[in-house]
Amino acid sequence: DGGITQSPKYLFRKEGQNVTLSCEQNLNHDAMYWYRQDPGQGLRLIYYSQIVNDFQKGDIAEGYSVSREKKESFPLTVTSAQKNPTAFYLCASSRGTDNEQFFGPGTRLTVL
Amino acid sequence: AQSVSQHNHHVILSEAASLELGCNYSYGGTVNLFWYVQYPGQHLQLLLKYFSGDPLVKGIKGFEAEFIKSKFSFNLRKPSVQWSDTAEYFCAVNEAGMDSSYKLIFGSGTRLLVRP
């Protein structure tokens, strides 16, 4: 069954701690993306990667970091520099950048 | 900067009513257009997309959308909604064939509640 998995589904962290969100895809897609979803604001792009070992900042990259060491994996680290990290985080992938994106189930991060 | 506007933030309908959700975008070039749906507790999934050709596109579950280039619009329609259509709907746009086509711009979403 092809798809995108994100773990964990819910994550709680104390303020000031870094936290890493997992995203794995078995669709053999080249491009992967991280979005943040806040109520009433739609989805905003954090980072994206077109190929392994390459990634670019999106609209709201400050306070986040990513890596793309494998085609299947695109983990997102929410650092202590992110001022308002509590949100719903969605990972997506696509065959290329001009194709439809497929989304994972999301991780809801709450910083206490 | 590009933007996508969804004018209706919350819509409440009774079953069998007709649905039209508005979507307007601001970009003068060639675009790809998408409608995504997020059912309660489920993944965001594609309802339909427009890349080129017939401006009236049909998607899953009886949804359709019409691209009107002169109005920069891509409104979503369904003739008769069901309770199971209760979800949040997102319109999205990207610049076709450009280096920046990775950048899918989303509207703020419309929450649809269908009453039985």
Image: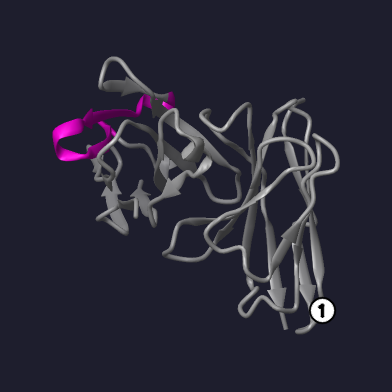
The spot of residue B83 in percent (x, y) is 40, 42
For image coordinates 81% across by 42% down, the residue present is: A73
Range of the magenta residues?
B60-80
Residue B45 falls in image quadrant:
top right
Q: Amino acid at mark 1?
A: Gln
Drawn side of residue B22 relative to residue A71, left or right: left
Q: Which residue is mark 1?
A: A17
- Please say whether residue B3 is visible from this viewpoint: yes
Residue A27 falls in image quadrant:
top right
The spot of residue B69 in percent (x, y) is 20, 32
Position of residue B11 relative to residue B61, above or below, is: below
Position of residue A11 relative to residue B68, above or below, is: below
Q: Decide whether residue B72 is among the magenta residues.
A: yes
Please tell me how crowded label 1 is: few (under 14), some (14-19), or many (20+) other residues with Cα within 10 Å.
few
Q: Residue furthest left?
A: B70
Total labels drawn: 1
Which chain does the residue under circle 1 lie in?
A: A
Q: Decide whether residue B58 is among the magenta residues.
A: no
Camera-side residue: B100 or B14?
B100
For image coordinates 82% across by 79% down, the residue present is: A17
Q: Residue furthest right?
A: A69
Position of residue A62 relative to residue A75, above or below, is: below
